[in-house]
Every structure is written in structure tokens, then in C-alpha cells.
């Protein structure tokens, strides 16, 4: 039986439904994300990277996510973000992830295609979605000066050859905070959208002005990833709380940081109009 993510994604492609995809790092950030989704009555994608899985443990994190989405009564889907290891992808599929991302974007085109095909083949029997990336979206610590925007014709061939469900595109975004105001190539996005038949994904949304994000959504982006702002809002709130307190009970200092993340995500839903 296909997963709910797969069914919802197909419906999203037909109806134009958009998803906010948020990374969580511990119980508090998970609670904050789901609380925001519950308040706005929205479906949401919960994302984990390899480093978060190593920090929390794969099965504990999965079980926690499932229990919390039931607790909040939210439709939430679990996604593996930026995986480069086929072993990790297999473990996450076995653990019941709704969607996995193979990130071979820094490899030559043919290798990216071959690896993405492998993951699609693996995921098919689980009914899970597969996301891949084409082009250069700077990761944390990488240069934002390097340019490698997604080529629309190459994107068409890539999607046709791999059978992926979601394509992360490089149109001017980057992971982490921006040193200069970003300028998304909306015209390129329009062309990619016209050339492909899959859901398009924007990585590195933290710090992009809301008006640009809305433009991107209006021109084909269906999954908007949010990570850096979540970590930053949680930690900055926690630091401020501790600066004025000698409290040692984490149950009394974490709630303020958790609420700050909830407020952030509620605001994102509202300003992005999704």
C-alpha cells in the first residue's frame, strides 16, 4: 500500500497543494513544529538529516515523531533530508519514512541519475517518495559565490530518467543565513516547472524575503524547506532566557524556546499563504 505521503503528493501535483517542511532536532523542536501545524490546521513534513538521526537515534526519533503527531492530531509525514548514504536511506525506508532524499547533486550528472534511479527502485516497494537535487545549492560552510543553477532541459531529462517524485532546484537559494540579500531566479523556475512533471522543492528558505518565497510558490515550488531559522530561533530564545535566570530546571526554561519556534512556523504559514 502506498504511503500517505505518496498519495498526498500526487494529489498536491493535481491540486497545487503546498507543504512546509521543517527540520526537528529534539523533542522540543518537534513539539513546536506540530503545535504550529495544529494551530493552523495544516499538514506538514517533518525532516531529519543524518546528523540529527545520529544525535537522537533513528528508531527513537521515528517513534517520537509518530507519537507526537498523534498527540497533536496533525497529518505529518517523515522525510530524510540530504542523505548521501544508500545504507542510511535503506535504514530509513525500513523504519517507515514516507519520503527520502538522495543528494548526489555534487556528482557528475550521470552519477546523480544512476544513484537516484537506485533509490527510486529501493523506495518503490515501500511506497515512499524520493527527492533528488539537480544544480548547486550551497550547504553550510560552502561558498555561495559558486553558481550552478538548475538547467531546465537537464531537469526534464533527469526527471524522466530517474522517476523521482520531488526535485530540489538551484535557483539562487543557499543553506544557512545569507550575507547578501538573495535573488531567486523566478524566470528559470517557471521554465523548470513547465519542463517537468514533479513537485519542485526549495532548499535554504531561511532568510529569503516572504515576497520572493510567495513568488516561488506561485511558480512551481510545492515543498519549502525550513531549518536554519528553527535552530536559530530556539537557541537565541534559550540564551536570552538563561541570561536573566539562574534556573536549573530545563522544564522551566525550554518552553519559551519551544513557543518561539511555534510562533515562527505559524508566521511562516501565514506569510507564505500555504
Image (spheres, helix red, strand yellow):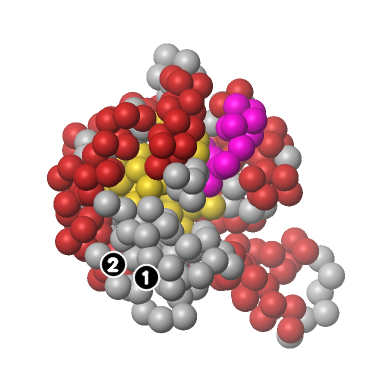
Q: Position of residue 68 (x, y in %)?
A: 58, 41
Q: Residue at coordinates 37% horizontally, 60% vertically from top-left?
A: 148
Quadrant, the N terminus: top left
Tell me the crowding category of disc 1: few under 14, some 14 to 19, or many 20 or more residues within 10 angstroms, Cα based. some
Q: Vertical placement of 33 versus 243: above or below?
A: above
Q: Could you give the CA–CA distance between mark 2 and mark 1, rounded to whole angstroms?
A: 9 Å
Q: Nearer the viewer, residue 65 or 109?
A: 109
Does the magenta-highlighted stretch encompass residue 87? yes
Q: Position of residue 129 (x, y in %)?
A: 42, 30
Q: Vertical placement of 239 versus 61: above or below?
A: below
Q: Nearer the viewer, residue 47 or 116?
A: 116
Q: Which residues are magenta?
A: 78-92
Label at residue 208 = 1
Secondary structure found at label 1: loop
Q: Position of residue 114 (x, y in %)?
A: 45, 31
Residue 89 placement: quadrant: top right
Q: Are marks 2 and 1 in contact (CB under 8 Å)?
A: yes
Say which of marks 2 and 1 sits in front.
Answer: 2
Q: Residue at coordinates 43% horizontally, 27% vertically from top-left?
A: 117
Q: Residue at coordinates 46% horizontally, 71% vertically from top-left?
A: 144
> In the displayed structure, does residue 204 sit left or right of residue 60?
left
> In the displayed structure, does residue 156 sit left or right of residue 100?
left
Residue matched to label 2:
184
Q: Vertical placement of 122 versus 229: above or below?
A: above
Q: Position of residue 93 (x, y in %)?
A: 56, 26
Q: Residue at coordinates 26% horizontally, 36% vertically from top-left?
A: 157
Q: Vertical placement of 55 versus 60: above or below?
A: below
Instruction: Work out whether mark 2 precedes mark 1 in sequence or the reverse, and give the earlier one.
Output: 2
Secondary structure found at label 2: loop
Amino acid at each position: 500500500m502506498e504511503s500517505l505521503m505518496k498519495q498526498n503528493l500526487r494529489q498536491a501535483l493535481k491540486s497545487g497543494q503546498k507543504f512546509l517542511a521543517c527540520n526537528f532536532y529534539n523533542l522540543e523542536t518537534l513539539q513546536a513544529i506540530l503545535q504550529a501545524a495544529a494551530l493552523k490546521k495544516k499538514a506538514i513534513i517533518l525532516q531529519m538529516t543524518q546528523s540529527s538521526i545520529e544525535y537522537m537515534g533513528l528508531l527513537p526519533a521515528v517513534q517520537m515523531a509518530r507519537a507526537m503527531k498523534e498527540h497533536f492530531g496533525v497529518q505529518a509525514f517523515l522525510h530524510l533530508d540530504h542523505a548521501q548514504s544508500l545504507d542510511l536511506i535503506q535504514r530509513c525506508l525500513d523504519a517507515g519514512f514516507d519520503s527520502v532524499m538522495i543528494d548526489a547533486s555534487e556528482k557528475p550528472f550521470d552519477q546523480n541519475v544512476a544513484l537516484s534511479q537506485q533509490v527510486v527502485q529501493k523506495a518503490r516497494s515501500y511506497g515512499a517518495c524520493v527527492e533528488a537535487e539537480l544544480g548547486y545549492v550551497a550547504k553550510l560552510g560552502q561558498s555561495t559565490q559558486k553558481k550552478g543553477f538548475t538547467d531546465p532541459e537537464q531537469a526534464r531529462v533527469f526527471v524522466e530518467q530517474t522517476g523521482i517524485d520531488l526535485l530540489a532546484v538551484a535557483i539562487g537559494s543557499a543553506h544557512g543565513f545569507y550575507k547578501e540579500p538573495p535573488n531567486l531566479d523566478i524566470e528559470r523556475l517557471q521554465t523548470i516547472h513547465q519542463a517537468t512533471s514533479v513537485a519542485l522543492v526549495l532548499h535554504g528558505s531561511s532568510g529569503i524575503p516572504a515576497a520572493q518565497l510567495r513568488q516561488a510558490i506561485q511558480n512551481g515550488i510545492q515543498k519549502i524547506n525550513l531549518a536554519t531559522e528553527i535552530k536559530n530561533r530556539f537557541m537565541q530564545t534559550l540564551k536570552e532566557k538563561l541570561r536573566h535566570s539562574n534556573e536549573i530546571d530545563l522544564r522551566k526554561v525550554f518552553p519559551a524556546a519551544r513557543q518561539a519556534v511555534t510562533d515562527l512556523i505559524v508566521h511562516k504559514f501565514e506569510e507564505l499563504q500555504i
